[in-house]
Amino acid sequence: MGNDSLTITDNRTGKTYELPLKHGNIRAMDLRQIKSDEKDFGVMSYDPAFLNTAACESRITYIDGDVGILRYRGYPIEQLAEKSTYLESAYLLLYGELPNPQQLSTFTARIAKHTFIHENMKKFMEGFRYDAHPMSMLVSSIAALSTFYPDAGNVADPEVRELMAIRLIAKMPTLAAYAYRHTNGLPFVYPDNELDYTANFMNMLWKMAEPKYQANPVLARALDILFILHADHEQNCSTSTMRVIGSAQADPFLSMAGAAASLSGPLHGGANEEVLRMIDEIGTTDHIPSFIESVKKGERKLMGFGHRIYKNYDPRAYMVKQTADSVFGVTGRNSKVDIAREIEKIALNDEYFVKRKLYPNVDFYSGIIYEAMGFRPEMFTVLFAIPRTAGWLSHWEEQCKDRDTKISRPRQVYLGPDQRDI
Ligand code: CMC
């Protein structure tokens, strides 16, 4: 079989197997031929939390976590954040190339056309309690959208898939803003399709009695950059959820509600909310050392730190930190950034964090900026979910086209009782 293979010797039987390597990896199914005797099921790999299991081939996002590299379709995230808009990056993720001016204008117009949501969705939103968590409202309302688009279940049709993707990217800011206005007891504001994607979102959040909402351009651009930074991150927990639910051919609204539910968890996108709560609890810089000690004793986690893939500085965290200055120039400085910077300084010089390669991740500084813009912590994960929509849908589309796709169905190692009688 040549050099592109792996030779395995089963010490139970003395037999040798040669497994082919494709792109440097074995197919887990090739292990199945390794049996202790004829009745044996065959060897599986045991990998809780998929620490070392590739579930798909993908051409969307590349991360090198050891050096802190993130690229969408080959383009470094730093260049996209500097030179593109969120909608351009979303187009790139979905279609594989950056749009030319004509493609961008068609795409932007299609998104604008679908920003409105059915009037009944307002009643649905009104049904939530005054103190409902905005992320729970968002997850439920994404799922509820499925009821308005029964044709969304036709996932084998590429045109239907594309239309649903456009609808979801277009409607997410509207759902998010409605959840925000409900939480604040304010009337819902309809989309203004003369505004661009981010400015329209700000309009739906913050417009009051003025006839036309004017978004502050610095804040609109900062939000757009944050959207670009959050748009995709390859096979993370929520994207994998999207792929797993999608593999059963559920419609994209329902698959994405599942993905958003996964994002809400404090170990995933929900960490940005937890970071702010943690900083508030720490209160002043002189409390940081005792807080760090409790983290090192294993009593709690330093939220916004650590990552499954990054064993170096998360490149998104750098750019979030840079964006803070432009936002503070408009909103005034959020003094919590001083506590965050001091936590980072102490942690990056402490053996506990150094040894485990724990660095700030994207969630560490984002909440401080969102708070300066006027958001309460409950909204932070919603602000993550809006742009991640492009990533979820790009992976879903890729999976729908992938001939290797089958329904996701992991195996287990059964350790319960053997048959017994009552
Ligand atoms: N604070 C303190 N210790 C930590 C932390 C942390 N934030 N993260 C990991 N560790 C320790 C962990 O206890 C373990 O120590 P030991 O080897 O002594 O048992 C070691 O570092 C390895 O951690 P792990 O739990 O095996 O790492 P993981 O890859 O399973 O978890 C993580 C990754 C992101 C869930 C975890 O780092 C964490 O919980 N961080 C805090 C939550 C957070 O900020 N999440 C946002 C992630 S980035 C946004 C996104 O994409 O979702």
Image (spheres, rainbow, N blue to C red):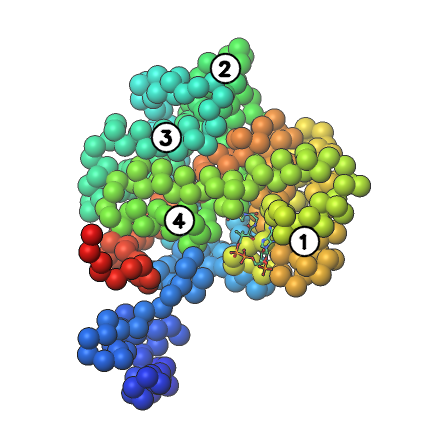
**Of tags 4 and 3, which is closer to the observer?**
3
Q: Position of residue 404 (x, y in %)?
A: 25, 61
Instruction: Indicate the position of residue 177 as horizontal and vertical percent values.
Output: 46, 25
Q: Position of residue 360 (x, y in %)?
A: 63, 51
Q: Residue at position x 68%, y 34% from top? A: 280
Q: State the CA–CA distance, disc 2 to disc 4.
A: 32 Å
* Residue 168 visible to an observer of this rendering: yes
**Does the residue tagged 1 have its C-beta within 8 Å of any atom of ligand 1?**
yes
- Between the residue at mark 4 and the residue at mark 3, the CA separation in whole angstroms equals 18 Å
Whether pointer 4 and pointer 3 mark residues with C-beta atoms closer than 8 Å, the reply is: no
Q: Amino acid at mark 3?
A: Ser
Residue located at (29% from left, 40% from top): 252
Q: Earlier in the sequence, mark 4 or mark 3?
A: 3
Q: Secondary structure at mark 1?
A: helix
Q: Is residue 319 visible?
A: no
In this image, 61 relative to 34: left or right?
right
Q: Which residue is mark 2?
A: 185
Confirm or deny contact between disc 1 and disc 3 (CB under 8 A). no
Q: Residues within 10 Å of mark 2 (few under 14, many from 20)?
A: few
Residue occupying image coordinates x 71% and y 45%: 291
Could you tell me how far apart the alpha carbons at marks 3 and 2 are, in whole angstroms?
19 Å
